[in-house]
Image (cartoon, grey):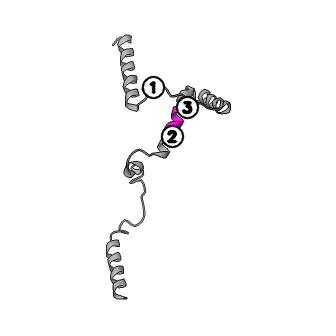
Amino acid sequence: MGVLQLKFLVLQFVIHQANIRGNVMPSPVTLRVDKETRQRIARIARRKQVSASEVIRQAIEIWIEVQEPAGSPYEMVSDLIGIVHGGNRKRSAGAGRQFAAMLKSRRGSR
């Protein structure tokens, strides 16, 4: 495989990844910020070695995720399911029977 073919494949991969992530910017947005905020954004961009636009995009994405979480409740905790080990595995096995007995005893005491 030649260098040109490899560069072309890498370019195709980058474009594909950008499309998957939604990083293709269809239109610009004008944002007015005060001088101090602009300087802080510039400092962060230099430190992270990204553009100021990327810093702003990341901040907006995080804010949107907090305001409007994507996915179902299951998807939001799916990485946590099954990671806890220990405890009594049969603890909940008799819960239904215990609850029914509690309801029966309450009914009988009336």
Magenta range is 56-60
Image depth: mark 3 or mark 1 in front: 1
89, above or below 47, in the image = below
* Left or right of 56, for residue 82: left
Camera-nearest residue between 6 and 68: 68
Q: Earlier in the sequence, mark 3 or mark 1?
A: 1
Residue tagged by mark 3? 55
As shown in the figure, which amino acid type bears the numbered disc 1? Answer: Ser
Mark-to-mark CA distance, 2 and 3: 11 Å
Badge number at residue 27: 1
- The answer to whether residue 58 is magenta is yes
**Can residue 83 be found in the magenta stretch?**
no
Residue 57 placed where, x, y %? 51, 32
The quarter of the displayed image where residue 56 is located: top right
Judge by depth and name the residue closer to the eye, 105 or 7.
105
| Mark identifier at residue 79 | none
